[in-house]
Image: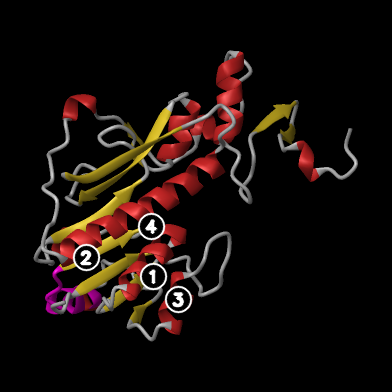
Amino acid sequence: MENKKVIYIGGKQIGVNCLRILLKKGIRPELVIANMDDNGQDTWHESIVKLSKKSNLSLIQNTRLSDKKLQKQIIESNADIIFSIGGTHLIPEVILKAPKLGCFNIHPALLPKYRGRYSTVHALFNGEKNIGVTAHWMDMGIDTGPIILQRKFKVTDADTAKSVYDNFTKLGTDIFEEFVEKWIKKRVPKSKIQNEKNASYYPKGLPNDGNIDWNWNGLQIYNFIRSMTFEPFPPASFYIGKKKMVIVEEKYFKGFK
């Protein structure tokens, strides 16, 4: 296999999973740029900083992509591709244009629907029966770039934000491995432009700021509660007067009947 030059930006569990795939295939990134909140300790997901140090990779921590010195380093690496997997960095145009092939991202939705943040949460709240994963090339828009690969999975009435996220992580990891295998064999899938007529966008934030609206119908309330169920983060909440109440599963109370 010819030498593949990669810059890797990312974090969360999917970022760790996909970095492991690259290493397994003998591809060692020129740089790994960790999310700003990754302090090298495993939390509700593994730490990409921890994996990078263990693998003796060139690691950048606590530095934003607006840093001119880092931008220069990325440009001069002459990378074939930049992978942004589970990344929370804002990527400036100068970096998007740097790699030969482009900047590759995995988004937890069936683009062009559910562009933006917390897409799986909004999809659950809206009662979607299918949610998916999209690999796409990045451009200056928010999740607007050409689609490379896309897969969907069914959502049951028992699914929560946590179970959907876990499904996305697994399927997203599979898609990443599929792409890398094709790329190694010089069979990069043809991308297609997104249909703007079908596009929807959700800004950063939870539905109704994470609070139940008792004017919703029963199904909306049910969908809201499961869209907010993602251990270890705060659950769905409501107020009785000035007192904030939260909704948690019965299993958290020993001896509860």
**Dominant secondary structure of the residues highlighted in magenta in the image:** helix
Per the image, the residue denoted by label 3 is 51
First in sequence: mark 4 vs mark 1: 1
> Which residue is at a point 40% across and 73% down the rendered structure image?
62
How crowded pointer 2 is (Cα within 10 Å; few <14, some 14-19, many 20+) is rated as: many
Question: Which of marks 3 and 1 precedes in the sequence?
Answer: 1
Image quadrant assignment for residue 27: bottom left
Residue at label 4? 86
As displayed, is residue 5 above or below residue 126? below
- Answer whether residue 89 is visible to the viewer in this image: yes
The residue wearing badge 1 is 20
* Cα–Cα span, label 1 and label 3: 8 Å
Residue 66 left/right relative to 203? left
Q: Amino acid at mark 4?
A: Gly
The residues tagged by marks 4 and 3 sit, at their Cα atoms, a distance apart of 15 Å
Tell me if residue 23 comes above or below residue 149 in the rendering.
below
Q: Secondary structure at mark 4?
A: loop
Amino acid type of disc 1? Answer: Arg
Region of the chain picked out in magenta, as a range? 70-80
Give the CA distance from mark 2 to mark 1: 16 Å
Compared across the picture, whether 145 is left or right of 247 comes to left
Query: Can residue 76 be found in the magenta stretch?
Result: yes
In depth, the one of 76 and 105 nearer the eye is: 105
Q: Which residue is mark 2?
A: 82
Q: Residue at x 59, y 44 (%)?
A: 230
Query: Could you give the CA–CA distance between mark 2 and mark 3, rounded to whole angstroms?
Result: 18 Å
What residue sits 61% from the left and 30% below the top? 225
Circles 1 and 3, Cβ within 8 Å, touching? The answer is yes
